[in-house]
Structure formats: C-alpha cells, structure tokens
Image: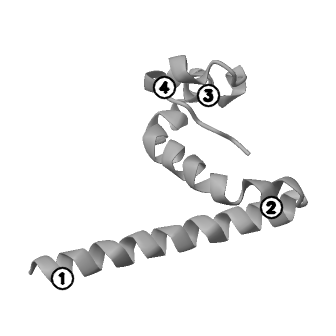
Amino acid sequence: MLFNIDEMHVNDQAHYSQACFINNYIKVSSLFMRVNSSATECSNSELNHIRKSLSIMSQKHAILLTYMYLCMSEIERKSVYLKQKQKSV
C-alpha cells in the first residue's frame, strides 16, 4: 500500500522509507504534482481502522476491501455534510 507523505509532515515521519514520500514520486513524474497529499494522508489515517484485517489478506482482497472502505467512508462523510447543510437552511 502506498503512503504519500508531503513536505509539511516529513519531520514527523522519520521512521518511513523514502518510498513513502510524495516528493520522490514527483521527481520521476510530474503527474504526481496533482495528488492532494493531505487528502491522501487523511485516507491513510482512515485505514488504521482496517489495518489488521488488511495485513492477513491477499493483495487482491486487500485492495477490494480498501476501495470499499474508502468509498463507504466518503458516502458517510457526504451524508453527514448534507444533513448539516439542511439543518442550517
């Protein structure tokens, strides 16, 4: 699983390998400049809830569970946002 860490958090993440840092990918391909590393880090923190389950799965199943979990988390966030928006109207 790829963890993208931005410059702002480099000092806090000394125990990660260089493969985790978004800046190393940007050096190779400018396409990674479009990645919102803060959003990526938020998703990574969400994955702490399923990390243990992911560690015992095959790669295929781990990818599917991660995708479904992040989709459902996004649906839940949107639902909460819309409910708050309706209350304020």
Q: Position of residue 3 (x, y in %)?
A: 64, 39
Residue beneath disc 2: 53
The residue positioned 47% from the left and 68% from the top of the image is: 74
Q: Which of the two residues, 2 or 79, is positioned nearer the viewer here?
A: 79
The residue identified by callout 3 is: 25
Q: Amino acid at mark 2?
A: Ser
> Measuring 47% from the left and 22% from the top, which residue is drawn there?
7
Q: Check the image and report above or below for 16 versus 67.
A: above
Numbered mark located on residue 20 in the image:
none
Q: Position of residue 76 (x, y in %)?
A: 45, 74
Q: CA distance from mark 4 to mark 3?
A: 16 Å
Q: Determine the secondary structure under disc 2.
A: helix
Give the amino acid at mark 3. Tyr
Foreground: disc 2 or disc 4 = 2
Q: CA distance from mark 3 to mark 2?
A: 28 Å
- According to the picture, the residue beneath numbered tag 4 turns out to be 9
The crowd level at tag 1 (other Cα within 10 Å; few <14, some 14-19, many 20+) is few
Pointer 1 or 4: first along the chain: 4
Q: Quadrant of the C terminus?
A: bottom left
Amino acid type at mark 4? His
Q: Which residue is mark 1?
A: 86
Residue at position x 49%, y 48% from top?
A: 42
State the residue lying farthest toward the left: 89
Inspect the image, locate mark 1, and give the three-letter code of the amino acid beneath it.
Gln
Secondary structure type for disc 4: helix
Mark 2–mark 4 Cα distance, whole angstroms, equals 26 Å
Depth-wise, is mark 4 or mark 3 nearer the camera?
A: 4
Residue 55 in percent (x, y) is at 84, 53
Total label count? 4
Q: Secondary structure at mark 3?
A: helix
- Vertical placement of 8 versus 35: above or below? above
